[in-house]
Image: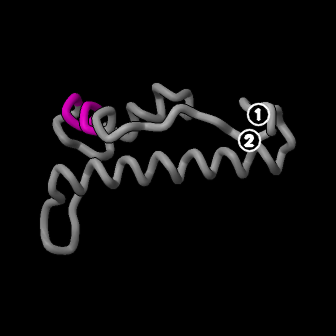
Amino acid sequence: DQTGNGTMTKEEKIASLLTQYQCKVSSIAKQRNAQNNDMNGKDGKLHPEPLSHSEARAYLELNDWSLNKARENVWEDFGWR
């Protein structure tokens, strides 16, 4: 949870959690496309609900601003564990 200059700000943590979420969605979509599994959408693409700024903030607040713990909770809630 640190940058090269010290501790990340709350906004940096929110942005990081949102970026990690998007990377995870992309990774899952690529895996499913490679495996030819059924996807959520009719077009064969993964269509998860987006994680909003306020949801990312809430996950972080509930986890005392620990980015690692918040990420674990997001992954668990979306069934990615």
Identify residue for label 2: 45
Nearest to the observer: residue 2 or residue 53: 53
Pinpoint residue 20: horizontal percent, then vertical percent: 44, 51
**Picture coordinates of residue 76 (x, y %)?**
47, 29
Q: How is the image coloured?
A: one colour
* Quadrant of residue 71 within the rendered picture: top left
Residue type at mark 1 is: Met
Is residue 55 depicted above or below 36 in this figure?
above
Occupied quadrant, residue 57: top left
Q: Secondary structure at mark 1?
A: loop
Quadrant housing the N terminus: bottom left
Residue 80 location (% of width, % of height): 56, 34
Residue found 69% across the figure and 46% down from its top: 29
- Residues drawn in magenta: 57-62
Q: Nearer the viewer, residue 25 or 7?
A: 25
57 shown above or below 11:
above
Q: Is residue 74 magenta?
A: no
Which residue carries the number 1 mark? 39
